[in-house]
Image (cartoon, grey):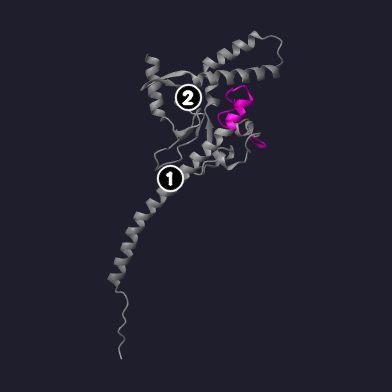
Amino acid sequence: MRSSVRGFTLIELLVVLGIIAVLSGIAFPTFSMVRASAKNAQCISNLRQLDSPLRMYSQANGDRIPIANMLPAIGLNGPETGLPQLLKSYIEITSPVWICPADDDSESLATGTSYMYVPGLLRYTPEIQMQVTRTVLLKQNLTSKAQAKERTDLEGQLLRAFYLGVDTSANGTGPRAAYYPLLMDSADRHSGTREPRNGLYLDGSVHETVPEEEAAKDDGEVQEK
C-alpha cells in the first residue's frame, strides 16, 4: 500500500527559504533601529540623572559652574581630574549613568565617561583666561595653592556669566545656555536616530545638540557682524 503523505518538493523548499530570507531582511534592520532607539532613550535618561549632582555641586559652591577637564585624563591609577571625580560626593564615579549604552569604544570607556564636559573646554577661551589672569595678578602674596583655588573660583563665576549671557545665532539673539550644552555625547553614537549627539543644558533639559557644521556657520556669521 502506497503512503499518501508526501514531503516538500525542492521548488517549494526554495520558495519557503526565499520568503524567510525576505522577512529576515525586513526584520533585522527594524530590530537594529529599535535597539538604537532604546540605547538613545537610556542615554537621554543618563544625562537627566547627571543634572542633579551638577546642580547640587553648584549650589554648594556659590552657584559657580563646576570646573573640570573636558574629559578625564587617564593616569596610572585610572581616570582623574574629570567631572566624575569632581562630583564623587554626589554620585559614584562608577555609576552606570556616566556611560552611554551605545559606547563600545575602549579608549572612551577607559576615561570612565562617555560624556564630554563642555565648560572644561570653554574655560580656556582667551576672554575668560585673560580676565582670570588679570584678577589673580592683582592679588599679591597668594600661595600657589591659593592662586589655583582663586583661578578655579573665577573660572566658575565667569562661565556661569557666559552661559547666562546672550549669543547671536542664525535665528537671532538668545541665551547661550540654550545653545551650549553642559554635557554632551563625546561622539556620534546614535546613528539611525534623530539625535546623534544628546546634550544636557543649564536648565536641565536634554535634547539634540547643535551640529558642528551649523555651529561653525553661526560663529562665522557672528564674526562678520
182 is within the stretch colored magenta = no
Q: Could you say which disc has been placed on residue 85 in the image?
A: none
Q: Secondary structure at mark 2?
A: helix
- Residue at image position (60%, 17%) is 154
Residue 127 location (% of width, % of height) = 52, 15
Which of the pair 35/69 is nearer the observer? 35
Over which residues does the magenta segment extend? 53-80
61 is within the stretch colored magenta = yes
Look at the image and tell me in which quarter the N terminus lies: bottom left
Give the residue type that dot 1 points to.
Ser
Q: Specify whether 221 is left or right of 99.
A: left
Q: Specify whether 20 is left or right of 167.
A: left
What is the residue that sits farthest to the left in this orientation? 11
Q: Quadrant of residue 135?
A: top right
The answer to whether residue 59 is seen in the rendering is: yes
Residue 132 location (% of width, % of height) = 59, 14
* Circle nearer the N terminus (2, 1): 1
Residue 13 location (% of width, % of height) = 31, 70
Look at the image and tell me in which quarter the C terminus lies: top left
Alpha-carbon distance for marks 2 and 1? 27 Å
For the residue carrying disc 1, how many other residues have a C-alpha within 10 Å: few (<14), some (14-19), or many (20+)? some
For the residue carrying disc 2, how many other residues have a C-alpha within 10 Å: few (<14), some (14-19), or many (20+)? some
Q: Could you say which disc has been placed on residue 37 in the image?
A: 1
- Residue at image position (43%, 19%) is 167
Residue 82 location (% of width, % of height) = 60, 31
Q: Could you say which disc has been placed on residue 177 in the image?
A: 2
